[in-house]
């Protein structure tokens, strides 16, 4: 029967696996042999040495081998606990082993049987004797010399245990399958395996589950980490090669004219804004598409850089679509653009699910119906279209779209472009913008297909935001301080946390992006602040349940300083820009991630005023304190990102937009060198053989992988 199991074999076809097991596995999305074998151990326990009973030391983890002398069970005085107790002997002595609620053990560990026992050597509180507490056991057959153990007397794999599947159960399942598994085909080219000193797939697969030494386990895991990173880099490099072959509009810029344009801005661009802008202009001039990520801390001034690029694109007669993740942001960009370039007469539009209007310079603004706007866009009468996801409607056809700008949602942009270029002769240039500072290794992995422009300074005369974690007893002091600031002309944000999805109630509504927002908390806070704490000040509130028009009105009025305090949910999180707001007060700050808190804080400190951020929390947990401390101390986003990454891991850090990626990202941040060599290997092989003609297996797997990791 050997060798009749293949990776694609369904587990349900394998004799001996019970339907109950199959059901449990299915719940973990494990259906084939491959699914099961790629469910790697998360760690290992070293039970490889067999100890003599007389050598045992209290509190060590150890394996012993002995004969079951006696075994019996009884109910204990604690209700519902069934205690199984055995006496085990070897030639040096005897020791007790106990298990709770496992009465069936008696049928397996019958007196006289030889078995291994791995577990913790525990000291009895009653008599000071040592005993084995809940050890893993495994019968040892004496007549098969080559008999290999699964659970004891070896390096034992420990799996993430979920839904009633124990490590022991998984080992029990995996071992015989590996024994009967036909040799697994290698997919990484041999020359790369050799160069990078990697284990072959077939060997690595066996060693990752049942290594003889810890070194073997590490080598096996390294191979799989490399494989993922290598595939990811192949996708990245291939994407670059593909784009290099595609045609796009070449957008020319006149140096003198551009300089003049920049001089009309109300401020002088920072050096890194200029550099980024220059990099973008050079890309736009090429006849193949740009694929660039503009990364810069909150408030570093990314918008204006993108806006000038859009303007120059319009001067060349081409269209730009400028997409923001929320209506509030789209409206803000639209307003800013109008204010910054009042002479722009080539047609600017705002398009969201609730609004459609056009502007042709100065006071010439028209509310148009969607149908009319679509027509104007199709005819090329509108050159710059700012909006939300509404920009990717199928029925929205552009005349000559040449540039796509995506604010605050990097991955989304690639998808959008793919959507937009279907059946088109020219591919638009893509500029993504992000304030999430991503450590270099990670960005090379995740955005390895993008070129990077970095704005690494804030505009001149910005002051450091003074950040304080406020204890409950100092709340009134903070209120008094805020009142003083407002009296001297400033404005304040108050942010309330949202409920997690698991707690969602009727009062909780979903905003456009599936975030659950606690409207109630905002309303309560609003009532409290407007009636009790600051009855003499003007307070407004903003949450996801409001209609887009209402939201727009509130944001506009707040930016026109028509009220003093804005109580809001996290709708305010990304991008909102109100330079006169100098106070950010965050309620329940322990309930936000660090990156999110950092984004909130970035809403203030945008003008010339000294700004303040107050973090309120009722939690006294030490971990909360530590987290808040890192935001208080963080000087820049990158530093914080690194901390956040350490605290929460890349899954949380990257968020759902990067589904499929966190696992690979995890490998990447643990292994910067591996990222580098994976990238080099990918470049080398695609340089020699861009279509992977000589590597059909690799080619197939790569296509599968590309689908799996998301963005197609
Ligand atoms: P972000 O990079 O977070 O998107 P914005 O583009 O919203 O930041 O810019 C933040 C604020 O800084 C805006 O009010 C913008 O007008 C202003 N700003 C941008 N560049 C400069 C500059 N070079 N000097 C002064 N203010 C600037
Ligand atoms: Mg922004």
Image (spheres, rainbow, N blue to C red):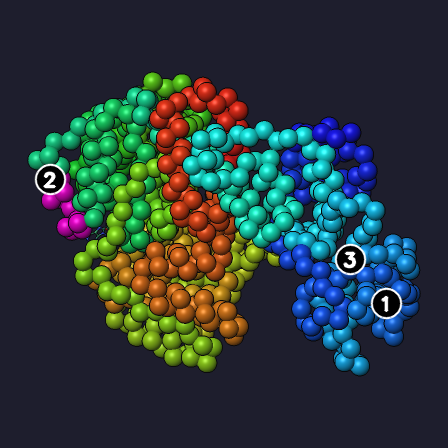
Q: Mark 2 Cα within 10 Å, few/some/many (few <14, many 20+)?
A: few
Q: What residue is shown with label 3?
A: 116
Q: What residue lies at 23% left-to-right and 64% top-to-bottom?
A: 463
Q: What residue is shown with label 1?
A: 87
Q: Is residue 600 visible?
A: no
Element at badge 1? strand
Res. 388 image quadrant: top left
The residues tagged by marks 3 and 1 sit, at their Cα atoms, a distance apart of 13 Å
Q: What residue lies at 17% left-to-right and 28% top-to-bottom?
A: 252
Element at badge 3? strand
Residue 29 left/right relative to 670: right
Residue 266 lies in the magenta-colored region: yes
Q: What residue is shown with label 2?
A: 259
Label 3 or label 2, whichever lies nearer to me, is 3
Q: What residue lies at 42% left-to-right and 21% top-to-bottom?
A: 691
Decide which of 380, 422 is in the foreground and name it. Answer: 422
Seen as rendered, the residue at the extreme left is 256
Q: Residue 523: x percent and y percent?
A: 50, 62
> Mark 3 near ligand 1 (CB under 8 Å)?
no
Q: Which residues are magenta?
A: 261-271
């Amino acid at each position: 029967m050997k060798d009749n199991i293949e990776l694609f074999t369904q587990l349900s076809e394998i004799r001996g696996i019970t339907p109950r097991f199959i059901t449990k596995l299915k719940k973990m999305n494990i259906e084939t042999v491959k699914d099961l074998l790629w469910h790697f151990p998360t760690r290992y326990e070293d039970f490889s040495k067999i100890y003599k009973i007389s050598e045992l030391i209290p509190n060590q983890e150890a394996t012993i081998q002995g004969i079951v002398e006696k075994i019996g069970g009884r109910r204990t005085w604690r209700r519902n606990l069934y205690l199984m107790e055995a006496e085990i002997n070897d030639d040096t002595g005897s020791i007790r082993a106990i298990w709770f609620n496992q009465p069936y053990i008696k049928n397996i560990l019958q007196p006289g049987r030889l078995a291994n026992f791995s577990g913790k050597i525990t000291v009895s509180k009653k008599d000071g004797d040592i005993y084995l507490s809940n050890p893993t056991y495994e019968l040892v057959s004496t007549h098969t010399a080559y008999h290999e153990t699964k659970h004891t007397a070896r390096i034992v794999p420990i799996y993430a245990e979920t839904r009633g599947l124990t490590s022991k159960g998984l080992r029990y399942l995996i071992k015989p399958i590996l024994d009967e598994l036909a040799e697994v085909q290698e997919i990484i080219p041999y020359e790369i395996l050799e160069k990078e000193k990697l284990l072959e797939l077939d060997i690595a697969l066996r060693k990752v589950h049942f290594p003889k030494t810890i070194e073997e386990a590490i080598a096996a895991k390294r191979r799989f980490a490399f494989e993922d990173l290598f595939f990811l880099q192949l996708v990245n490099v291939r994407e670059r090669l593909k784009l290099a072959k595609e045609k796009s509009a070449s957008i020319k810029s006149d140096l003198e004219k551009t300089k003049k344009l920049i001089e009309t801005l109300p401020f002088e661009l920072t050096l890194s804004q200029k550099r980024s802008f220059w990099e973008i202009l050079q890309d736009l001039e090429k006849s193949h598409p740009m694929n660039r990520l503009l990364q810069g801390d909150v408030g570093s001034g990314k918008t204006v850089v993108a806006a000038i690029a859009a303007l120059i694109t319009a001067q060349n007669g081409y269209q730009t679509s400028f997409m923001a993740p929320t209506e509030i942001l789209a409206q803000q960009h639209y307003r800013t653009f109008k204010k910054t370039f009042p002479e722009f007469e080539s047609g600017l539009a705002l398009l969201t699910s609730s609004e459609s209007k056009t502007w042709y310079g100065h006071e010439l603004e028209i509310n148009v119906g969607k149908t009319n706007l679509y027509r104007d866009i199709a005819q090329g009468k509108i050159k710059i279209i700012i909006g939300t996801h509404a920009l990717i409607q199928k029925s929205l056809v552009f005349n000559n779209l040449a540039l796509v700008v995506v604010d605050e949602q990097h991955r989304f942009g690639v998808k959008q472009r793919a959507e937009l270029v279907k059946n088109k002769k020219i591919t638009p240039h893509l500029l993504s913008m992000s304030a999430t500072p991503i450590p270099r290794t990670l960005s090379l992995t995740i955005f390895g297909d993008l070129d990077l422009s970095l704005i690494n300074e804030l505009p001149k005369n910005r002051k450091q935001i003074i950040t304080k974690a406020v204890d409950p007893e100092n709340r009134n002091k903070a209120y008094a301080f805020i009142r003083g600031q407002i009296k001297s002309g400033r404005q304040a944000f108050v942010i309330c946390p949202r409920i997690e999805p698991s707690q969602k109630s009727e009062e909780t509504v979903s905003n456009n992006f599936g975030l659950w927002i606690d409207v109630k908390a905002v309303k309560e806070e609003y009532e409290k602040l407007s009636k009790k704490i600051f009855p003499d000040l003007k307070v407004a509130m903003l949450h996801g349940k409001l209609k887009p028009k209402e939201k727009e009105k509130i944001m506009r009025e707040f930016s026109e300083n028509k009220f003093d305090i804005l109580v809001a949910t996290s709708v305010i999180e990304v991008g909102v820009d109100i330079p006169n707001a100098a106070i950010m007060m965050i309620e329940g700050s322990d309930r936000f991630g660090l990156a999110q808190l950092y984004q909130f804080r970035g809403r203030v400190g945008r003008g010339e005023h000294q700004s303040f951020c107050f973090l309120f929390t009722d939690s006294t947990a030490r971990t909360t304190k530590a987290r808040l401390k890192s935001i208080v101390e963080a000087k820049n986003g990158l530093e914080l990102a690194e901390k956040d990454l350490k605290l929460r891991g890349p899954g949380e850090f990257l968020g759902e937009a990067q589904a499929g990626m966190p696992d690979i990202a995890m490998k990447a941040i643990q292994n910067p060198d591996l990222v580098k060599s994976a990238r080099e290997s990918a470049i080398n092989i695609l340089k020699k053989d861009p279509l992977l003609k000589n590597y059909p297996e690799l080619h197939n797997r790569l296509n599968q992988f590309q689908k799996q990791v998301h963005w197609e």
